[in-house]
Image (cartoon, grey):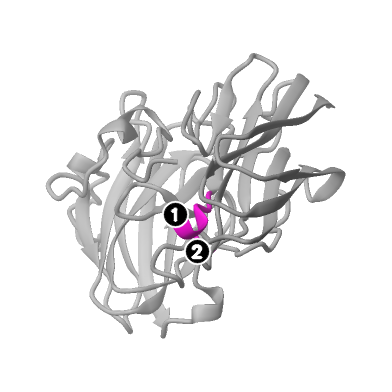
Amino acid sequence: MDVRAVIPLVFVLASYGCGGGGGSDGGTSSNSSPHFATASSPAEAATRQISCPSSAVESGAKLTPTSQNFFEEINLPADGEIVVYTDRSEFDTYCYLLNQLGNIITSSDDGGNGDNCSITASLRAGTYSILIRAYDSTSTGNFYLGSSCIGPYQKLTDPTADPDNSGGGGVDPGGLGDLSFVLIWTYTGSSRSEGPDIDIWVENPDGERLSTSRDGLALGPDSYGGTIDLDDRGGWGAGIGSGPERLSWPVASAPAGSYSFGTRYFEGDGDVEVTLKVYRGSTVTSTWIDTMTAAGQTKNLGTIAYP
């Protein structure tokens, strides 16, 4: 995988950059009408500073038919555990927390009240971005974006605990949404302590390919909202080694038909045993185990019929 590549989560991410400019103009008060801002690309994003400790700060935002993403840059001057959330939304929201490269650190479609989403994450000081989308990718309306620092940095729950981390370290994070594929692996004989870079790939029934090798539609989304939210490059980039990597479709969105899937030994050295699990909701329905020995090797592990 190429760390220079930016996830094509939606069209605008192809030109990802840390923005500062448009977007939200701050909180609301009872003495004035709230302003609901748009910021459909990172270049339009306003910057919100989250100091630790801090109380909740909220600002108005909206999605429209021509602006179906809302970005806001987050500046965290010191390590801390933060909460970013939506409130009083007029539609079902989906929250994404992104690093400076535009890669997903974590995401959530729930955690808030009703249709609102919420993310809690322990982060090192730095610059991040929050992306808000509609769960169904088409709904529009107003919402409030809030944030606060709730405590000190907690390494054990930090999705970016390692400077190059993508989360997990060989621990299966479980299923997500309707249908998901999870890859973890073990290795021996690698020249780097975090091991080789092993990638997952899946083709949906329409032949659209999602892959952490960044071929096809790369990390997504596909036409049905399928995305890759976890990616581990081991000793050759972002990641702490051994996975997990996860690809999933939101509830009630995975298309019916045949899915093919497998792995690619993208970079590195050492002998590898891969474990790929297929989840329906939170239940494992099948597990595939195989070995890989050299960079460039690709495995077609199997196919499943869904539903």
Asked if marks 2 and 1 touch (Cβ < 8 Å), the reply is yes
Q: Spot the residue most to the top.
A: 206
Q: Spot the residue most to the right.
A: 285
Residue at the location (70% across, 22% down)?
255
Query: Which tag, 2 or 1, sits closer to the chain's start?
Result: 2
For the residues marked 2 and 1, what is the alpha-carbon distance in whole angstroms?
A: 8 Å
Q: Is residue 45 left or right of residue 274?
A: left
User: Circle 1: is it few (<14), some (14-19), or many (20+) Cα within 10 Å?
Assistant: many
Amino acid beneath label 1:
Trp
Give the residues in magenta: 231-240
Residue 246 magenta: no
Check the picture and name the quadrant holding the N terminus.
top left
- Label of residue 192 in the image: 2
Let me know if residue 280 appears in the view: no
For label 1, the residue is 236
Residue 124: x, y in percent? 35, 73
Let me know if residue 302 appears in the view: yes
Q: Is residue 235 left or right of residue 78?
A: right
Residue at the location (55% across, 21% down)?
223
Q: Nearer the viewer, residue 171 or 255?
A: 171
